[in-house]
Amino acid sequence: MSPRRADLDIVVAGRTGPNHLVRFGETDSPLDERGRADVEESVRGWSITAPVICGPERATRETAALLSPAVIVDAGLAGINVGKWAGRLPEEIPGAELRAWFADPTARPHGGETVVEFVDRIVEWIRGAPDVAVLVVSGPVAQALRCDDASSFFTADVVPGRRYRLG
């Protein structure tokens, strides 16, 4: 299901304070000092000549700005909609809801997108994407791009601030 483009680099947005706390659906948090340093280290010596396309989250935009002065923000690359869980810590969510979501990619205990819907949305975006060489995305979007299908979404490892090559 996931696209495989050997010509596409993705950079995961750097760490934020809420990211460090594993807070669900945070969209307006700035990079923290470590997040900024991780991004700078990951892309050191990398020359980007084309515009960078990024998701709408603040940390994603700030990460993209570290890579290029030419940044295009695209709402189609937004992270997964976690509905009523947005801004909450895992321990603030009933265990049965979390277990259902992690076990079944079609589950919607938070009222937002299912994992299947989210992965499908990102795959469709990338299939129709402009000819671009670099994307800067949130961790969940990077997972959607790296997983084989929605059932393997949670096993797709990504690290904040790290660069990956699709393919």
Image (spheres, helix red, strand yellow):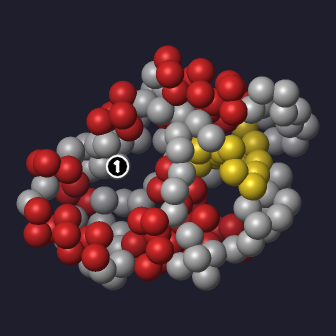
Residue appearing at x 29%, y 36% in the figure: 21
Q: Residue 70: x and y, percent?
A: 79, 34
Q: Residue 24: x and y, percent?
A: 30, 49
Residue appearing at x 51%, y 72% in the figure: 119
Task: Please state if 95 lies on the left or on the right of 167 as rendered.
Answer: left
| Residue where numbered disc 1 is placed | 25
Residue appearing at x 31%, y 59% in the figure: 82
Indicate the secondary structure of the residue bearing disc 1: loop
Taking depth in this image into account, of 65 and 96 the one nearest to the observer is: 96
Q: Residue 20 occupies which quadrant of the picture?
A: top left
Task: Please state if 51 lies on the left or on the right of 148 as rendered.
Answer: right
Q: Residue 60 occupies which quadrant of the picture?
A: top right
Taking depth in this image into account, of 161 and 138 the one nearest to the observer is: 161
Q: Is residue 81 above or below residue 55?
A: below
Q: Residue 144: x and y, percent?
A: 54, 65
Question: What amino acid is found at the position of numbered circle 1 in the picture?
Answer: Gly
Task: For residue 61, say whether it is visible.
Answer: no
Taking depth in this image into account, of 25 and 73 the one nearest to the observer is: 25
Taking depth in this image into account, of 26 and 73 the one nearest to the observer is: 26
Task: Please state if 55 lies on the left or on the right of 20 as rendered.
Answer: right
